[in-house]
Amino acid sequence: MNAQHMGQRLKEAAQTGDIDVLYGLTREDAFVLERVNEVPFVDSPLHIAASAGHIEFAMEMVNMKASFARKLNPDDFSPMHLALQHDKTQMVLWLLYVDEGLVRVKGRGGMTPLHYATEQGKTPILEEFFEACPESIKDVTFQGDTALHTAVKNHQVEAFQLLMGWLQRSVFVDAAFWERELLNWKNKEGNTVLHIAASSNQRQIVKHLIEAFVYTNIKNSNGLTAIDILQGQAQFSNKELNKCSAFPLADSSQVPAELGT
């Protein structure tokens, strides 16, 4: 049987979750999974099973070829990314159980599964991510967006609130430093989370950030602070704006650098 036909049968087994066919193929050709693994970017049987939610098949696959769990497909997605995109929650949680570090695998645009779960507002999954790998909140996209940026850009208020709690509850090394750093982090456009919340009129999030004592005079690439943006919006009173101005930077050296530097 030629390799192409073997590959097609392996794909079909993953799509249907047929474990017997999987083992039949490996008995016929002991190198069938090795050939898949040799391709730098490929939809492995684990990618396919993860998309379909076939957990038992995925279990067998990880046992046979653990490297597939971190492999990216041609679209730059890992199996966990695909499970999230296809709403296969139990698959996501099982993969997290196998390797909590999978939540930090960067896919297209540098987005991790944490960014995707945040973008989609999947708060129960975010809770599981926090319990398994709290340091994953430090990861940023290629555009310099933290998970907090992602939450605010997508108007995911519950996800934002959960992430804020995540920062406050974290006890990993330098957690206090990272709380300040991430709350004031500038993405590639120089925007902090507060800039984005102010620009998109998200009053609840702006108030939450101000109460968290974020720095308010960080300038973005257009030379604007969040206060500059808020001053042009009628829903914020002068009293509220004065409160915002009460927490400026102590000095310019405290401004966090853009991501990627």
Image (cartoon, helix red, strand yellow):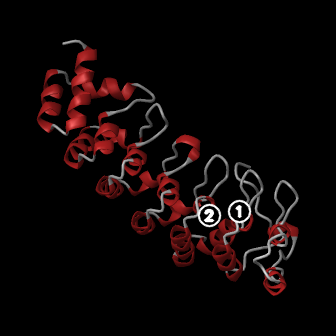
Residue 189 in the image: state x and y as whole percent.
Answer: 76, 52
Who's the residue at 64% across and 77% down the image? 204
> How many residues crowd around disc 1 within 10 Å: few (fewer than 14), some, or many (20 or more)?
some
Who's the residue at 62% across and 63% down the image? 152
Q: Is residue 184 left or right of residue 163?
A: right
Q: Is residue 79 above or below residue 135?
A: above
Q: Is residue 88 left or right of residue 233?
A: left
Q: CA distance from mark 1 to mark 2?
A: 7 Å
Who's the residue at 40% across and 51% down the image? 84
Q: What's the mark number on residue 152?
A: 2
Quadrant containing the N terminus is top left
Query: What amino acid is found at the position of numbered circle 2 in the picture?
Result: Val
Query: What amino acid is found at the position of numbered circle 1 in the picture?
Result: Ile
Q: Is residue 31 visible?
A: no
Q: Is residue 136 left or right of residue 184?
A: left
Residue 79 in the image: state x and y as whole percent.
Answer: 38, 43
Does dot 1 land on a helix, a strand or a loop?
helix
> How many residues crowd around disc 2 within 10 Å: few (fewer than 14), some, or many (20 or more)?
many
Q: What's the mark number on residue 196?
A: 1
Q: Are marks 1 and 2 in contact (CB under 8 Å)?
A: yes
Q: Is residue 239 above or below residue 258?
A: below
Who's the residue at 48% across and 57% down the image? 120
